[in-house]
Image (tube, coloured by chain):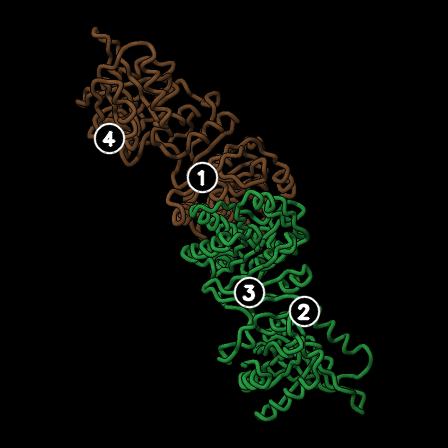
Chain colours: A green, B brown
């Protein structure tokens, strides 16, 4: 098999940890696999470099200099891992993003990958070498180093796996995989063996921070079989793959319950109910880069107005307030809420999923303040104090602890 | 003027120091100059990276991985200085060795510069930008990062100054310039205003470690006017230039006195005095990479043998012993010696320089154990205990304190 492995910051956080990673890579090599290993900066390094920059510029600039600065962390780790592998008798070579053939657009500090020329990787693999690649970076059409933004090393790994048509792309972090819900809230949470790209996208955007959405979206697009697992043990991880690869899909209705404590509810009262008003409001919010999540608009009232509800991240409440106040007679902001989401591709073909949620929450005396549904997700806003109770009750109701 | 400045590790050793460097660069920019600034890694960083590598491989490898590893330090400094300059309102851009167009040969960890394509530098200068370049590195014909070995950032600066035909190449360190002798030995040592390339080469090889010889040799070859000065004050430094630029050369007979405590004297007795023997011995030493410095061979004795004396660095005594023992009836090694060197281009046209040295040392009761002379240098081996006394006496005798 050709395996792309990616090790995150905590997995390579110390020299001892890098040594452990080297041993694990060698185990995989010994088992007869070809290995391409993408590494992050040692944990803390990137933040330290940002602090350095902020010593000079209060807000770290988003330019070529930051690309040059931040890309250095991953280069160090890739060199060290390659040195470790060579020292253990396993020929390896370290490549920068440029060396790995990763071409990006010209955006500074958050470039997007355009293409990968795998020539250098192919050659090294043909020579029997383990290829170690500095994640998080590429090179633009002007030959300048670029960086890919937060989660960039995952993106590097997925893109390389796609370009190489690798059998597997393993993302190593300090967690075992994707759980049915946060085990700190529900000790009976189970690790999922498999989950579809779409389910993962819904879970990730709601606080299950194993993988960033950009990486899952890219994996879906390139049809890369992603595995998230821990570098601190040898437990099996969770395979994130296409729905077509999900066996027994009919049986699995719900994959997980997510809790997002970062949302605030906005209620706009007596908004003029005529075509284009909502569009105008949400365009104004988008222009200020405010991330609107759930949107609820009820049927209009007799006085020609309507109430409009939506959620925004809590730290964007003030910006949102400035934008929307002129559109309503009054606007209420409530940060004392949480969003509980029920996710599962099985939902598509099963009725009654929503009614289980309603009856479960009712039985616990939890009032539903907002609700929105999609094909594979039901999201519910409840008072913050009920958040964890709601997660545990729903986890049990959908038999996720079975 | 177009000025290339190079700041060494202690000059950029902390964020505060980098800020000071930014201010100094801006002073020069405000004065109407075009500025290209080459930076080293922050002091300690390169050694730390080497220690990291040695955690995995007892002797840090000399390969591509080390190039990748070590080149990161200078990249960080260049990005930070550029960020600092931009934040202060002076447009700047950071370039890696590759970005600066520095092409080297393919040797890992000690590459030699082959050529410089100044296109990117020229463009940035034309845009009015201050160009900040990561020293110590380039790129080979395969597109891989290379590093230039110890003192590599000085080399980068000199090579860039040569390629740009810069008016001046200033090398900033934590010392004020080149002195007539080590001020710790002779408090009356004077800083030299000017010194020729050749004199500097002789002084540098003998312990005046302001600049490495590779850089001075390159400056001489490219006819670059080098200035060494301190980044910790605004004192004038020392200009290192061609003899043709030395005014009043006739008056200056001796430029400085150097003390080298690292030499050991080897005396081989009863070496067979026939053609080819010396060549064989010194070839054998060269094959083991032993750096032979002074060589003295007296006229042969009546028994067809001769005594052969030379000096080697003290840490190479054991290697030298293994090589030479078979060539002589007995070999003596004496590490309890020092080498005192008198350097000056004026020596060429002035007789009597050597006799001053002899009479000065004799007056102090210092026995000369070996002596060798060149056009611009007289080197004398004396017992270690007399080293500093000899330096002070000669410094006074040649009126260097005047």
* Label 2, residues with CA under 10 Å away: few <14, some 14-19, many ≥20: some
Q: Quadrant of the N terminus of chain A?
A: bottom right
Q: Residue furthest right?
A: A275
Residue under pointer 2: A243
Cα–Cα gap, marks 2 and 3 = 17 Å
Image position of A400 (left or right of B392) = right
Cα–Cα gap, marks 1 and 3 = 35 Å
Q: In which quarter of the image is the C terminus of chain A?
A: bottom right
Q: Chain letter of disc 2?
A: A
Which quarter of the figure has residue B141? top right
Residue A228: which disc? Answer: 3
Camera-near label (2 vs 3) is 2
Image position of A372 (left or right of B316) = right
Cα–Cα gap, marks 4 and 1 = 38 Å
Which quarter of the figure has residue A284? bottom right
Cα–Cα gap, marks 4 and 2 = 82 Å
A226 over B310 or under it: above or below: below
The answer to whether one can see residue B44 in this image is: no
Mark 2 and mark 1 residues within 8 Å of each other at the beta carbon? no
Tell which circle, 4 or 1, labels the residue nearer the N-terminal end: 1
Residue under pointer 1: B62
Image position of A186 (left or right of A303) = left
Residue under the image location 34 percent in, 31 percent down? B207
Q: Chain letter of disc 3?
A: A
Say what secondary structure mark 4 lies in. helix
Residue under pointer 4: B388
């Amino acid at each position: 098999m050709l395996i792309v492995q990616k090790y995150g910051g905590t997995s390579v956080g110390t020299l001892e940890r890098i040594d452990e990673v080297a041993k694990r890579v060698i185990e995989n090599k010994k088992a007869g696999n070809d290995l391409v290993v993408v590494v992050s900066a040692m944990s803390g390094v990137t933040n330290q470099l940002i602090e350095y920059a902020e010593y000079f510029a209060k807000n770290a600039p988003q330019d070529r200099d930051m690309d040059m600065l931040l890309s250095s962390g991953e280069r160090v780790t890739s060199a060290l891992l390659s040195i470790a592998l060579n020292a253990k008798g396993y020929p390896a070579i370290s490549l920068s993003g440029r060396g790995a053939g990763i071409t990006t657009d010209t955006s500074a500090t958050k470039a997007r990958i355009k293409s990968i020329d795998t020539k250098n990787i192919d050659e090294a693999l043909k020579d029997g070498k383990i290829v170690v690649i500095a994640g998080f970076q590429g090179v633009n059409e002007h030959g300048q180093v670029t960086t890919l933004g937060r989660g960039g090393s995952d993106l590097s790994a997925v893109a390389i796996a796609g370009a190489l048509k690798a059998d597997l792309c393993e993302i190593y972090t300090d967690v075992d995989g994707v759980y049915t819900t946060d085990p700190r809230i529900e000790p009976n949470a189970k690790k999922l063996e498999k989950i579809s790209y779409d389910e993962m996208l819904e879970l990730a955007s709601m606080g299950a921070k194993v993988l960033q959405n950009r990486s899952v979206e890219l994996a879906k697009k390139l049809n890369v079989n992603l595995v998230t697992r821990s570098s601190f043990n040898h437990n099996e991880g969770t395979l994130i793959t296409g729905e077509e690869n999900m066996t027994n899909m009919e049986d699995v209705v719900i994959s997980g319950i997510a809790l997002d404590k970062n949302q605030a509810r906005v209620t706009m009262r007596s908004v003029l109910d005529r075509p284009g008003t909502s569009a105008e409001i949400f365009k104004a919010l988008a222009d200020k880069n405010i991330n609107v999540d759930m949107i609820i608009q009820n049927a209009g009232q007799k006085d020609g107005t309507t109430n409009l509800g939506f959620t925004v991240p809590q730290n964007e409440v003030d910006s949102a307030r400035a934008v929307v106040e002129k559109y309503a007679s009054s606007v209420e902001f409530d940060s004392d809420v949480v969003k509980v989401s029920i996710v599962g591709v099985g939902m598509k073909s099963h009725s009654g999923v929503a009614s289980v949620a309603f009856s479960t929450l009712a039985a616990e005396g939890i009032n539903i303040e907002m609700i929105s549904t999609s094909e594979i997700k039901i999201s519910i806003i409840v008072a913050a104090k009920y958040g964890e109770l709601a997660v545990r009750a729903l986890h049990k109701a959908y038999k996720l602890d079975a």
